Image (cartoon, rainbow, N blue to C red):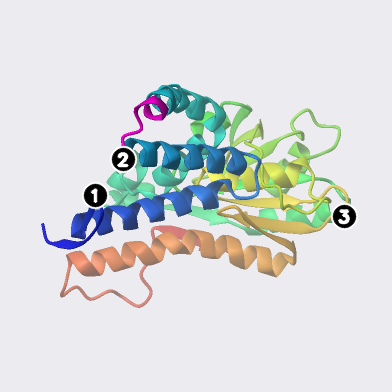
């Protein structure tokens, strides 16, 4: 490998430059993941000690190398324990970004498109949201387009019912045993109610965001879902996507954002079909794999 330059006993070649580049990207992504939490200080302290360990080992300080080496050996286990939430979040982000999950992998094949087609009627959801907002009744609705979120659905009560305004109002009624939790909607049906969602640990959230908003943000961070929230204090509506919350939106805006969430996959499917069939002619009014009626 071509030697770029040499400083004393240290030689620096092209592989070292590439290595440093990727390590820098990795450390920056880890820092972004933990930014705003107490864990970032522990991470920076551990990183500083590790850099000292590399320096003393390079200059052959045997005593310090032995001491810091023992600390580094135990430090790996300590890091796993201390950063367990951050490591879990990092792995969830990687898993969410890949397209090799079972649902996504088989969904890509053309002969599977008809099997995954469904119809989502947004109108009953928006009508129920108007009533919930007017009466300041809190609600938490999770929309999923890839899976029924079995882990979270099993934490609540299975319903499997057709979406309707009266059913949603019954679930989120303040005197209903099902109102305390989230509703999961998948494949055009209410899969479950009273579901427990992961709570976001972001430190920069406004103080007026309660547990319902934090649960919606945490769910969108952990899964590829869209979360619709009705505030119990103000009756205002919010949409959460990929950890980003859009507060104080109107019903038309909420309707459009929900439709856009499902139409994202439709666009990707059309692009993939054009790549597979180079000479294919796509009809102008072709039915999408996720038909949404408003």
Task: Tell me which segment is drawn in magenta.
Answer: 60-65
The residue furthest left is 1
- Disc 2, SS: helix
Q: Is residue 166 visible?
A: no
Q: Position of residue 28 (x, y in %)?
A: 47, 54
Residue placed under numbered mark 2 in the picture = 58
Q: CA distance from mark 3 to mark 1?
A: 66 Å
Nearer the observer, 283 or 156: 156
Q: Is residue 231 visible?
A: yes
Report the side of 72 relative to 192 (left or right).
left
Mark closest to the chain's N terminus, 2 or 3:
2
Q: Residues within 10 Å of mark 3 (few under 14, many from 20)?
A: some
Q: Residue at x 42, y 29 (%)?
A: 64
Q: Position of residue 148 (x, y in %)?
A: 49, 38
- Disc 3, SS: loop
| Labels 1 and 2 touching (C-beta < 8 A) | yes
Q: Residue at x 56, y 29 (%)?
A: 82
Q: CA distance from mark 2 to mark 3?
A: 61 Å
User: Is residue 118 shown in magenta?
Assistant: no
Residue placed under numbered mark 1 in the picture = 9
Q: Residue at x 19, y 58 (%)?
A: 13
- Number of the label disc, if any, that sits on residue 234: 3
Report the side of 203 relative to 271 (left or right).
right
Nearer the observer, 113 or 222: 222
């Amino acid at each position: 490998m071509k030697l770029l330059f040499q400083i004393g006993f240290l030689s620096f070649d092209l592989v070292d430059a590439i290595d440093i580049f990727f390590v820098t990207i990795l450390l920056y992504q880890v820092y972004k993941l933990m930014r705003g939490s107490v864990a970032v200080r522990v991470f920076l302290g551990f990183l500083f000690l590790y850099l000292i360990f590399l320096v003393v080992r390079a200059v052959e300080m045997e005593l310090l190398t032995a001491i810091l080496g023992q600390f580094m050996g135990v430090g790996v286990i300590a890091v796993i324990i201390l950063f367990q939430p951050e490591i879990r979040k990092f792995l969830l982000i990687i898993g969410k970004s890949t397209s090799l999950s079972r649902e996504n992998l088989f969904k890509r094949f053309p002969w599977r498109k008809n099997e995954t087609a469904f119809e989502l009627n947004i109108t009953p959801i928006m009508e129920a949201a108007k009533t919930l907002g007017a009466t300041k009744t809190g609600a938490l609705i999770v929309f999923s387009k890839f899976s029924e979120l079995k882990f979270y659905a099993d934490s609540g009560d299975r319903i499997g019912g057709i979406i309707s305004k009266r059913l949603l109002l019954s679930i989120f009624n303040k005197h209903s045993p099902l109102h305390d939790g989230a509703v999961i909607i998948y494949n055009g049906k209410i899969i479950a109610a009273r579901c427990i969602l992961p709570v976001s640990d972001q430190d920069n959230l406004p103080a007026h965001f309660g547990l319902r908003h934090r649960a919606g943000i945490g769910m969108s961070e952990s899964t590829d879902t869209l979360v619709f929230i009705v505030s119990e204090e103000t009756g205002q509506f919010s949409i959460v996507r990929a950890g980003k919350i859009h507060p104080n939106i109107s019903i038309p805006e909420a309707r459009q954002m929900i439709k856009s969430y499902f139409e994202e996959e439709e666009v990707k499917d059309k692009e993939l079909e054009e790549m597979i069939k180079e000479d294919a002619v796509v009809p102008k009014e072709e039915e999408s794999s996720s038909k949404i009626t408003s």
